[in-house]
Amino acid sequence: MAAGSLLALLDDIATVLDDVTVMSKVAAKKTAGVLGDDLALNAQQVSGVDSSRELPVVWAVAKGSFLNKAILVPAALLISAFVPWLIIPLLMIGGAFLCFEGAEKLAHKFLHSPEEDAAHKERLAAALVGKEDMVAVEKDKIKGAIRTDFILSAEIIVISLGTIAAMPFLQQVVVLVLLSVVFTVGVYGLVAGIVKIDDAGLYLTQKPSGLARSLGRMLLALAPRLMKLLSVVGTAAMFMVGGGIISHNWELLHHYSEGLAEWLGAVPGVGGVLHAIGPVVFDALVGLLVGAIIVVVVTLVNKMRGKKAVPAH
């Protein structure tokens, strides 16, 4: 009797684990796009610090990401159980904030003259003369990266929660915790590798092997180009993710997005490609417009309050 009960229990556990594995894979596929944006944004956010401090900064942001998910997972489960109508408004607010950050970066880049940027860099260089100043700048970067991670983590968790909504509560908890740990380790492991490419290149250039030195020089040439690309991709991702959250949860915009996809899909020869790209471009344009509106409103409010516009991170 006891042996039969034990076997039945083990069979139930195996079934649960199989269900958890299957649904984890499904949720991971649905959040793959957001994870790509998360990687680009965070690699771009933690770049620009002193080489010796890159890994500590990545580790600090990763710890912040774990804390974000430790808050978001229970909160998402509670909200889903008791006030499910609140999930969408919170996501919309987070999406709007991402659009604002992206538009703020563009405004800083294109609306400031080269003389203003040069003067700003000179003031920054003059200010960074003490260890305390460097620590302050580093802390500011970490806070910005953790704040961005919070919004993207919220979207990942909500998408995952929607995928596993039909599962028993305990299995939902297991899946969300498992995905949170795997995603965080994976994303920040890759971020750590990306920001240390130049160090790896420098190390290889000092090796006696000609092949190693050539590879090292290639990595050194690649590193700044990759970081510049990630900076562009990271800013674009803010509009695509933020605009996507807004357009997918605003019925009118969602209707236009679907109509655009169908119209582009009918184009002979390239309909399949345009059908996939069209909604992404539409989301990015929505994000750009929403971000620009918020930047204008924030700038006007700051001027009325006698404050300067918030600088880009």
Image: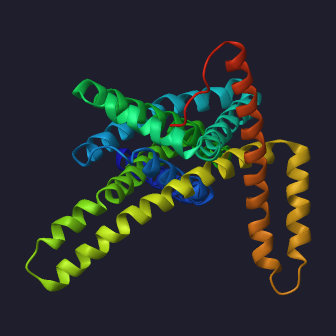
Rendered view: 154 above or below 4: above
Quarter of the view holding residue 212? bottom left
Task: Give whichever of 250, 3 is nearer the camera.
Answer: 250
Residue at 30% from the left image edge and 31% from the top image edge? 128
**Is 32 left or right of 193, judged from the image as shown?**
right
Q: Residue furthest top?
A: 305
Q: Which x, y percent locates residue 211?
A: 19, 84
Q: Which x, y percent locates residue 209?
A: 11, 82
Give the colour scheme of this rendering: rainbow
Q: Is residue 142 visible?
A: no
Q: Which x, y percent locates residue 204?
A: 17, 71
- Exactly how many numbered labels are in the figure? 0
Rendered view: 13 above or below 206: above
Task: Give whichever of 114, 137 is nearer the camera.
Answer: 114
**Is 253 left or right of 202, judged from the image as shown?**
right
Q: Residue furthest bottom?
A: 269
Residue at 21% from the left image edge and 46% from the top image edge? 52
Task: Give whichever of 163, 203 is nearer the camera.
Answer: 203
Rendered view: 40 above or below 278: above
Rendered view: 42 above or below 142: below
Q: Is residue 241 visible?
A: yes
